[in-house]
Amino acid sequence: MNYPLLNVPERPAKPRQKGLTMVMDKGLSLRQVEDFIDVAGVHTDIVKLGWATSHVTPNLKEKLALYKSAGIPTYFGGTLFEAFIIRNQFSDYQRVLDEYGMEYAEVSDGSIDIEHDKKCGFISELAKQVTVISEVGSKDAAKIFAPYKWIKLMQAEIEAGAWKVIAEAREGGNVGIYRGSGEVREGLVDEILTQIPEETIIWEAPQKEQQVWFIKLIGSNVNLGNIAPAEVIPLETIRLGLRGDTFDYFLNQVK
């Protein structure tokens, strides 16, 4: 921080296991990545190249090298995994991970149906190769899972070898753990947290109101994902009670 300020929540140093900020890169140029790292790299824990954008991104290896030089892990979006799976190209996907030096991978089934035992098998196999982040929830707004099912799926994927599980919301924050309006399904989140450790979950929260809600519920060091590059600094101020939305929230909690 640039100057001392009392009664500010403590944020663990990177690399950290909780309080993660996962950023979605939907097609930044090399110059934009350099600028992003310069401004927000210190507050960014991991970057996802959204859905299958890596397939069409120019200078992909150069982009990945920039993030790596800044000590920021990257991974390809889960939709790319699904694109390989539906074409029966799992071994090709593994080769792509090796070719691009990926240390993380996302396993999801938000766009296609995969038998859950088979999905867990993919997680277990990939966990021998990389650190796996799995995603639970559908991108189809019509598919609404009961809380017990979210819990069951998350537990099984963690047991299969997932490092973290992502609670699906898409980049718009209007499916999965949210209603179409973007409002949090509060009962669902509360139920999930009765069984799944909060540090194991990355809550996709692209909207400021969603970020504020989770920070007030769990604290400054909640894991949040699908953050736009330009929103990393604003999010960090929300985590620290330095924006109007949480300005008074931590003053009496921090010693």
Image (tube, helix red, strand yellow):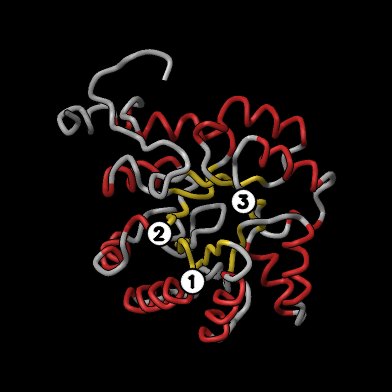
Q: Which tag is nearer the camera, tag 3 or tag 1? A: 1
Q: Mark 3–mark 1 contact, CB under 8 Å?
A: no
Residue 247: horizontal and vertical position, in percent? 28, 27
Kind of element beneath mark 1: loop
**8, above or below 85, in the image:** above
Residue drawn at x 72%, y 62% as measured from the top left: 97
Q: Nearer the viewer, residue 224 or 179?
A: 224
- Which of label 1 and label 2 is nearer to you? 1
| CA distance for labels 3 and 1 | 19 Å
* Quadrant for the N terminus in the image: top left
Q: CA distance from mark 1 to mark 2?
A: 14 Å
Q: Earlier in the sequence, mark 1 or mark 2?
A: 1
| Label 1 crowd bin: few (<14), some (14–19), many (20+), radius 10 Å | many
The answer to which of 251 and 131 lies nearer the viewer is 131
Give above or below for 202 relative to 6.
below
Q: Which mark is residue 201?
A: 2
Q: How far is the residue under mark 3 from the one under mark 2? A: 16 Å
**Which of marks 1 and 3 precedes in the sequence?**
3
Residue at image position (72%, 71%) is 83
Residue 137 coordinates in the image, percent (x, y): 48, 70
Vertical order, 42 against 22 (above or below): above
Numbered circle sitting on residue 48: 3
Q: Kindly identify the amino acid type of the residue bearing the numbered disc 3.
A: Lys
- The answer to which quarter of the image holds residue 158 is bottom left
- Image point 74% across, 41% down: which residue? 65
- The crowding category of the residue bearing disc 3, from other C-alpha atoms within 10 Å (few below 14, some 14 to 19, many at least 20), is many
Taking the spot 60% from the left edge, 39% from the top edge, the residue there is: 71
| Amino acid found under the numbered disc labelled 1 | Gly
| Mark 1 lies on residue | 161
| Helix, strand or loop for disc 2 | strand
Which numbered dot is residue 230? none
The residue type indicated by label 2 comes to Ile
